[in-house]
Image: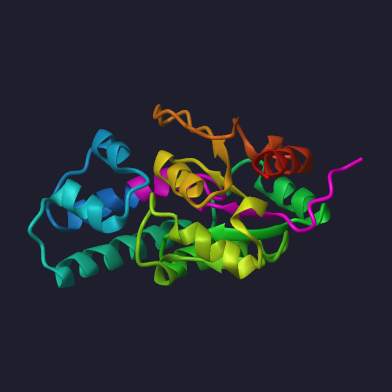
Amino acid sequence: MRADLHGIGVIFDMDGVLVDSFEPHRRSWQLLGQEIGRTVSDDQFAATFGRRSREIIEILFGPGRGEEEIRRLDDRKEELYRGLIRDCVPLMPGVEGALRTLRAAGARLAVGSSGPRENVAIVVEALAEVCRFDAVVCGVDVTRGKPDPQVFQIAAARLGLPPSACVVAEDAPVGLEAAHRAGMSTIALRDARNSAPLRADAVLETLEALSPELVRGLVRRLG
């Protein structure tokens, strides 16, 4: 019998969990670099993946830029990124099946991302035929980036659930730390392109293995 997930929330990070954004993010940073006369290598980009845009700008293009210039570069980079994914959102393997199965089991579902609202909207719309998320948190909703737990705390509040009833699906160490600090169980999605250790309650190769039974077991253990 399938586990009953009523009263349980599953909060999904976006990049690397719902959408395979590594390549379009890499390409958009390199395109931005070309526009301002800077070269961004694959290794340089890989070392910044998962960080906030303003941090990446400083790492890739140097410190000392004013807020207005940082905002301009950030906006342009995200515009380039959306241009790359808009017509064909690269969903992660197993996403659609996992969302359908969790929804059928009664789980409440949320997106917890610090990414731009427009980026999150594209992905949410691409999944609209699969399910409608009960809560969506994006960059405009938070003032502190991961590993601060704020994004997941807001998501849980919007789901109307306590942190102990929520499980977070993440792919980045800073996101997993944020979820732990929020008092939530964690599921890490392993990325072969990132060798960083993943401290999580469960580690999956793909979302195809994200079952209601696993979610129920994690919440019961935390509780």
Q: Is residue 5 magenta?
A: yes
Considering depth in this image, is 81 or 113 the residue closer to the camera? 113
The segment highlighted magenta reads 1-26
Residue 88: image location, x then y, percent: 54, 56
Answer left or right for 4 relative to 142: right
Question: Is residue 122 among the parts visible in the rendering?
Answer: no
The residue drawn where x is 65% and y is 47% is: 95
Considering depth in this image, is 214 or 185 the residue closer to the camera? 185
Residue 130: image location, x then y, percent: 73, 59
Determine the residue located farthest toward the left in the rendered image: 64
The residue drawn where x is 47% and y is 42% is: 176
The C terminus, quarter of image? top right
Question: Is residue 20 among the parts visible in the rendering?
Answer: yes
Number of marks present in the image shown: 0
Answer left or right for 207 relative to 142: right
Residue 3: image location, x then y, percent: 84, 44
The residue drawn where x is 20% and y is 52% is: 33
Determine the residue located farthest toward the right in the rendered image: 1
Residue 155: image location, x then y, percent: 56, 63
The residue drawn where x is 41% and y is 71% is: 140
